[in-house]
């Protein structure tokens, strides 16, 4: 098992950027958003995009 610290940091940075962007979108669209829903959406989409962009692609030989 190798050291994957760089990938974890990269995933954290992407997740943070997406979470802040989602928070901004929720606050822009809804005049008085529920804080728990906004934080939940930010966390969910931050984690989703962090996993999508930071995962290593595997080549599968046919």
Image: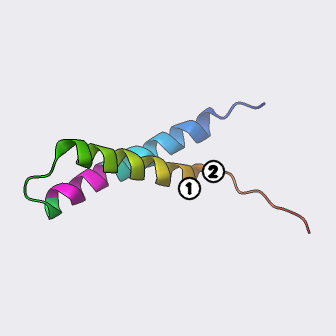
Image quadrant in which you'd find residue 7: top right
Tell me the tag on residue 10: none
- Residue sitting at 61 percent across and 32 percent down? 5
Answer above or below: position of 33 versus 1.
below
- Position of residue 9 in the picture relative to residue 36 (left or right): right
Quarter holding the C terminus is bottom right
Task: Residue lying at the far bottom in this picture: please name it.
Answer: 62
**Residue range (magenta):** 20-27
Q: Are marks 1 and 2 in contact (CB under 8 Å)?
A: yes
Please name the predominant secondary structure of the magenta segment in the image: helix
C-alpha distance separating marks 1 and 2: 6 Å
- Residue sitting at 81 percent across and 61 percent down? 59
Q: Horizontal and vertical percent for residue 31?
A: 7, 58
Q: Horizontal and vertical percent for residue 21?
A: 29, 55
Element at badge 2?
Answer: loop
Q: Horizontal and vertical percent for residue 48?
A: 48, 52
Tell me the tag on residue 55: 2
Element at badge 1?
Answer: helix
Mark 2, other Cα within 10 Å: few <14 / some 14–19 / many ≥20: few
- Residue sitting at 13 percent across and 60 percent down? 30
Image quadrant in which you'd find residue 28: bottom left
As for residue 18 lying within the magenta part, the answer is no
- Position of residue 18 in the picture relative to residue 1 (left or right): left
Q: Which residue is mark 1?
A: 52
Answer above or below: position of 13 versus 1.
below
- Position of residue 9 in the picture relative to residue 45 (left or right): right
């Amino acid at each position: 098992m190798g050291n994957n610290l760089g990938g974890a940091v990269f995933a954290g940075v992407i997740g943070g950027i997406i979470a802040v962007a989602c928070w901004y979108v929720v606050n822009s669209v809804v005049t008085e958003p529920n804080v728990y829903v906004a934080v939940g959406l930010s966390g969910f989409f931050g984690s989703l995009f962090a996993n999508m962009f930071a995962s290593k692609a595997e080549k599968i030989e046919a």
